[in-house]
């Protein structure tokens, strides 16, 4: 019975294990986060001046939203690199954002996590 079950399972998955862990051949996986470079800042998510229109809600953009009135780690305005659907619910809200600089020393922050602290910025 066990042998028959093993054959049926092997037939369902093609009999070969997936090697390499990349489910989409030819598509590179993103680099893992570098915790040492992570920045956590508190401020207000706002539409950037002259923000471009959105083609779709899954396109990564770094010119549409900014984090203003950043309280930590320093008073700096960050451009936020994320998909539209990740940031649009927080427009006008006070948030805590964690991410990594797009390039070392850059004010463009690749957003990894957003937490709403208040519904409005004051």
Image (spheres, rainbow, N blue to C red):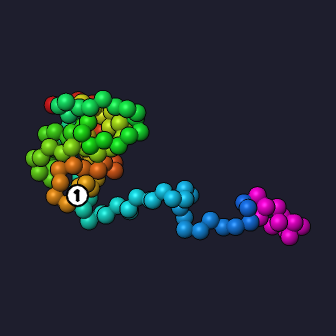
**Residue 61 seen anywhere in this rendered image of the structure:** yes
Q: Quadrant of residue 120?
A: top left
Q: Is residue 7 above or below residue 23?
A: below
Residue at 66% x, 67% y is 17
Residue 66 pos. (x, y %): 21, 39
Give the percent coordinates (x, y) of residue 104.
20, 60
Q: Quadrant of residue 64?
A: top left
Q: Is residue 85 left or right of residue 16?
A: left
Residue 20's place in the image compared with 99, above or below, is: below
Mark 1 sits on what residue?
Answer: 103
Place of residue 106 in the rendered image (x, y in percent of width and height, measured from the top left): 17, 54
Q: Could you tell me which residue is drawn at 79 percent across and 61 percent down?
A: 11
Is 28 on the left-hand or right-hand side of 14? left
Task: In the displayed orientation, state which residue is furthest to the left.
Answer: 75
Which quadrant is home to the C terminus?
Answer: top left
User: Quadrant of the rendered structure where residue 117 is?
Assistant: top left
User: Relative to residue 115, is residue 1 drawn left or right?
Assistant: right
Q: Is residue 39 a member of the stretch shown in magenta?
A: no
Query: Where does the N terminus fall, quadrant-wise?
Result: bottom right
Range covered by the magenta-colored residues: 1-12
Q: Position of residue 34 (x, y in %)?
A: 31, 64
Residue 86, can we see it? no
**Depicted 72 relative to depicted 92: above or below:** below
Name the residue: 38% across, 62% down. Answer: 32
In terms of secondary structure, what is the magenta stretch mainly?
A: helix
Disc 1: CA contacts within 10 A as few (<14), some (14-19) or many (>=20): few
- Check the image and report above or below for 107 versus 119: below
Give the residue at the far front of this rendering: 26
Which element type, helix, strand or loop, lies under badge 1? Answer: loop
Queried whether the magenta region covers residue 10, the answer comes back as: yes
């Amino acid at each position: 019975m066990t042998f028959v079950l093993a054959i049926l399972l092997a037939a369902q998955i093609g009999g070969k294990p997936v090697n390499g862990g990349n489910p989409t051949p030819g598509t590179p996986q993103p680099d893992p986060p570098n915790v040492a470079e992570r920045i956590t800042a508190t401020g207000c998510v706002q539409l950037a001046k002259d923000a471009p229109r959105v083609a779709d809600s899954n396109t990564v953009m770094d010119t549409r939203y900014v984090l203003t009135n950043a309280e930590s780690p320093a008073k700096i305005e960050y451009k936020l690199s994320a998909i539209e659907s990740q940031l649009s619910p927080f427009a006008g809200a006070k948030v805590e954002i964690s991410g990594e600089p797009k390039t070392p020393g850059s004010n463009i922050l690749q957003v990894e996590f957003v937490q709403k602290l208040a519904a409005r910025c004051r």
